[in-house]
Amino acid sequence: MEISEIMKALEKNTAGHFPKGALEEAISRKEEITPHLLDTLVYAEKNMRKLYSNVEYFAHMNAMFLLAQFREEKAYPLIVKLFSHSGSLPLDFTGDVVTEDLHRLLASVCGGNTSLINKMNEDRELDEYTRDAAARSWLVLVANDIKTREEAFEYYLSLFRGGYERKPSHIWGGLVSDCLDLFPEGEFIAEIKKVFDEGLVEESFVTMEDLYREQKGGRVKALNKLRAQSQYSLVNDAVMELKAWAKLSERPAEKTERGNYDFLTGIPAPVEGANSVGRNDPCPCGSGKKYKKCCLEQNMVMKGPSVQELYSNHREQMPVLVNYDKDPIVFCKVYFSILKKDAIKTVLNSSADIEYDDRNKKWVWLSPGINPMGGNTILGTISIEGDELVLDTNSFKRVSKFKKYAEKSLKGYISYLKTEAKDITAIPEPSPEEKKKAAREQEELMNIPEIKAMLSQKADDYYLKSWVRQKIPMLGDITPYEAAKTEEGRQILNKMIDEIDERQNASPLDPFRVDTLALRKKLGLAR
C-alpha cells in the first residue's frame, strides 16, 4: 500500500469494517508513516469542532494509539494540546479515552518528561477528568520503571500542598486513589486524612477504609499489583486496542448527528434536557459519580421509548464480566507453530512466572499480587499440542502480554499462527443439574474438617498473632496493641473490626473467618 492509501484507510471508522491491514502496514512502515500521523493530530486539534459532527471520523484515534506504540515523543505536545481545550469538547470528540486510556497515551509518548503532564494536571481551566488522567499517568510511569515511586510521591505531595485548589472536586478523589496504589506512608497518611476532614473527597469514590484495606498487603504487594494491572501498562498493541475502540464508537448508519446517540451504546439520547448534563459531568442525582456511570442509562430508558424498540429483537445485554486485571473476559486460544521444541521447553521451565504442572502436562502462567484473595493469579495455561504451542487465557490484553513475552523470550523458537476468541455470552448456561453439582462439590470441599480447620487457623494466626503486632498506617503507624491504650485508637479499632464483621456476615459460607470476639478480647475491646 502507498502511504496515502494507508492514511485514507485510517481516516474513518465504518460500521462492519476494521482497517487491520492498514494499521499493520503502518506499524511495519513506522518511519514513513510517523510524520503523517503527527500531521493528523495537528489537523484534528485545529478542526476539532468541525470534525466532531462527522460520526465516522477516526483518524485522530488511530494516530494517537499508533504514535503511542511507536513511543513517538513528538506526539507528546500534540496530544496534550488536543486535550487542553477548555470545556467538554475534547471529551466528546474522543469518547471515553480521557477516563480509560489518556493516562497510558501520555506516559507512552512523554519519554519520561513529565513537564507537560504536570502543567496539564495543574491547569485549573481544564476538565477535572482530563486533569485526573494526567495525574494518573505518573502511575503508568512508575509501573513501567520510567519513574520511581519516590519521584511520584514527591510530585503528589506538591499537589496536596498547593498544586490543587482547595475545593471539593473529582481530582481530589483521583489523587487519593493514585496514592493508595503506590502504598502511602508517613506524612502522606496525614495529608490524606486532612483532605477527608475538609470534605474535599467524595466518599462514594474513595474512603479512609479503602486506605486501611490497601495497607494490609504491604508495599511490595501494592507495587506488584500496580505493575500487573493492564490499566497501568504502556500502549504496546495499537491494533488490538483500536479494534476495541472502533467497535465501541460505531453508531447506527442512518443518523449523522453525533449528539443524537450515546457514544458507547448507540442508544438515542434523552429528548428532554439532552444538552443540560454532559456524559462526563457529575450526575445530577448527587451520587458524586459521572453521569454516564450513574443515571444516564436509566434516563434514556425513562425518556426515550425508542430504546425498547431498538432492542426489541436483541437479547438483553449481560453485564460486563472482568478478570482480576479488570479486563473484559473473552476466552482466547492462541496458536503458535513450533520451530524448536526443546528450546521452548528450556525457556518456559526457566521463566520466573511460569511453572510446569506435571499432573496436567501444561505450563501455568502466573502473576503475583493481583488476586485480592492473596497469592498468585493464573493468567493462563500453555501446552504443546503436536507441532503447535497453545496458550489458553481469558482476555485480549493477556494475549497481547503473552505475545510480547514470546517476542522477547521465544523469538526464533515459535511463529504466531492465529487467535480464536469466544465471548463469555457464547458459553452455554449451565444446566440446573450442573449448577447443583458444582454447588454440592464446593460445599463438600468446604465441609471437610481438615480444610475448615486449616482456614480457620490461618485466619486466627494472622489476626490474633500477627496483625495485632503490626504497625498499621491507619492507626498512625502504631500497632493495634498500642492503639488500644487511647480512646481515639480504640474507636478506630472498633470500626476496623466492625468492618471485618460486616464482610463475614455478607459471606456466611466463607470458611476463612476470624473470631472477632476473641480479637476484641485480646485488645481489651470486648463489648
Image (cartoon, rainbow, N blue to C red):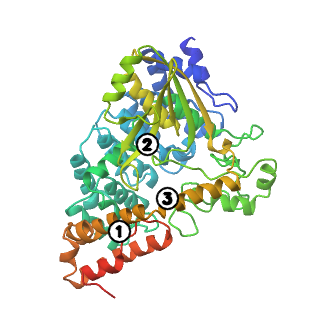
Above or below residue 477? Residue 344 is above
Q: Nearer the viewer, residue 269 or 52?
A: 269
Residue sitting at 65 percent across and 40 percent down?
Answer: 53
Residue topped by disc 2: 378
| Residue type for callout 2 | Ile
Q: How far is disc 2 from disc 3 in space, using C-alphas?
A: 21 Å
Q: Residues within 10 Å of mark 3 (few under 14, many from 20)?
A: few
Q: Residues within 10 Å of mark 1 (few under 14, many from 20)?
A: some
Mark 3: secondary structure: helix
Tell which circle, 2 or 3, labels the residue nearer the N-terminal end: 2
Q: Nearer the viewer, residue 318 or 166?
A: 318
Report the number of discs: 3
| Residue type for callout 3 | Leu
Q: Taking the image as drawn, is residue 231 in sight?
A: yes
Residue 320 point in image, percent of width and height: 59, 50
Q: Nearer the viewer, mark 2 or mark 3?
A: 3
Q: Nearer the viewer, mark 1 or mark 3?
A: 3
Q: How far is disc 1 from disc 3 in space, using C-alphas?
A: 36 Å
| Residue type for callout 1 | Met
Residue topped by disc 1: 208
Residue sitting at 57 percent across and 18 percent down?
Answer: 6
Tell which circle, 2 or 1, labels the residue nearer the N-terminal end: 1
Residue reaching furthest to the bottom: 527
Residue sitting at 77 percent across and 50 percent down?
Answer: 311
Residue topped by disc 3: 445
Mark 1: secondary structure: helix
Q: How far is disc 2 from disc 1 in space, using C-alphas?
A: 31 Å
